[in-house]
Structure formats: C-alpha cells, structure tokens
Amino acid sequence: MARRRFFVETVRNGQAELTGDHAEHLRRVLRAERGQRFEISDNERVYLAEIEAFGKGQVQFRVLEEVAAETPAARFTLLVSLIKFDRFEWIVEKATELGAEVIVPVKAERSEKGLDVAAAKRLDRWRRIALESSQQSRRTRIPQVMEPLSFALALSVKSDYRFLLDEDIGAGAILEAAPAQRSAADRVSLLVGPEGGWTESERKEAAEKQWRAVSLGPQILRAETAAIAALAVLAAAWCTSSAAK
C-alpha cells in the first residue's frame, strides 16, 4: 500500500514541519505516532520521513532519504472558461489528479456575467482543493491555479501545442491532433469553452492565433465533462508515447 503524502513548506537540514489542518488531520484523525513514516514533498522533491515530534498545530518530521518522483507525461496547462463554481471546483480537483501543471480560469463571451470578479475571491479555495487533490493523487508538485484571464490573454499563452476544444463539426478528432513525436518536455495547452460553446468571433480569433480546433465527438458535453475528458485523452496520449520509448 502506498504511503500517504503531505506537502510541507520547506525541507531544511533534514527537518520539515507540517502545520495547520493537515497536521491536525494527521495527528487526530489518522492517529499518527512518533516514528511512523510518511512521504513529504516540498513541491520540488519527495522524501521518506518519519514523525519526530508533535507540537501545537504541527507535526515535525525527520527526513530519512529522498525517493524517486514520478515524471509527468507532459506540461499541461488547462484553460477553462468560467462556469458555476461548484462545477469549476470539480474541474480543479480532477485536473490536478490528471496531472495539469497550470489551471487558468478564462472569461469567455458566453461566461455568466460577474463570474470573473467573483472568481478572484475563490482563488484561495481552489488552491486548497488543488493541494488536497495533489496529496491524494501523490503528486510531486501542486498545480498553479492562476487568476482569471480574458479570452484574448488566454490565447497568448505560450505552448508547443495549443488545442481549442470545440463542438463545431469542423473540428478534428482530438487524438488525431496529437503529434507523432511526444515527450515529457512538451508544453500542451487546452482551452475549453463555457456552457453554450464558443462564439464565431472567438473561433476566428483562436484560429488566427494558431490554436488548433479539436473535438471529442458529436455529443454535446457539459463544460466540466468536456474539460476533464479532453485532458484525460491528451494525458493518456502523452503517457502512451512515454511508455513506448
């Protein structure tokens, strides 16, 4: 059984400290004891560590050794048009599990009015969700959850491959859009529209900026379903390429 993993601020001189709610959960819910071993990450490396002591609202670890960390299939950026926040939270959680490196809320023409302003107040919550999901899925690094961007700024994101998910019949199959040669160093951006889809002006602007329109098929999916399904397909494509080498 895989050991539980927790994120700490720093690892220094073979020592680390877990604080806050996660420390309380480890001590009171999991009933951890001195000498018990867990994995910890400083958001760069992963270590095997054992509990050395407990303090008020903290757990102190002694690092035993560095352990091998998984290599992501690629560097995925998921840009998602703002939707109702309960659904957006689900996207953050699942995108984290699927290996997204960056998650960006986007204000599209058909996004509900005011969501971009309200989103700024939700960033801390979304980042906590990303942290908790990273621990559950045993990631080495927590994804960045960025402040909302306008559609125009979202289109300027730098990537090696940029895909616009679209239900338009002219969009090609997403699997066919994946390049034949893929590597873990590839930067891959996926831009997903709101409920109601993209407007024609947004499609035109994306095409002018060299975003490739891709589709998951003829069914009309909810925005959160489309985002996670498309990210899963791309992650699987890059994982398959890595495994074949």
Image (tube, grey):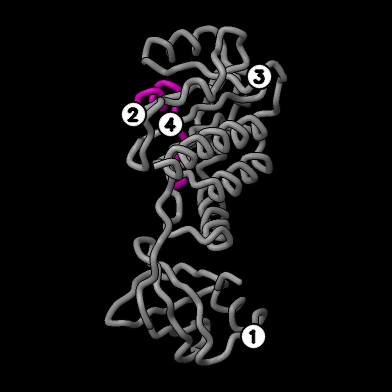
Classify mark 4: helix, strand or loop: strand
Query: Where is 28 relative to 207, above or below?
Result: below
Which residue lies under the disc numbered 3? 217
**Mark with earlier residue (2, 1):** 1
Please identify the residue farthest to the left as the structure is shown.
13
**Mark with earlier residue (4, 1):** 1
Identify the image quadrant of residue 215: top right
Look at discs 1 and 3 and give the one toward the viewer: 3
Residue 152 x %, y %: 41, 21
Classify mark 2: helix, strand or loop: loop
Label ID, residue 31: 1
Q: Are marks 3 and 2 in contact (CB under 8 Å)?
A: no
What amino acid type is highlighted by mark number 2? Answer: Asp
Residue located at (60% from left, 49% from top): 93
Label ID, residue 160: 2
Q: Which residues are magenta?
A: 144-160
Residue located at (35% from left, 73% from top): 66
Look at discs 3 and 4 and give the one toward the viewer: 3
Query: Where is 174 relative to 244, above or below?
Result: above
Label ID, residue 189: 4
On whether residue 174 falls in the magenta region, the answer is no
What amino acid type is highlighted by mark number 3? Answer: Gly
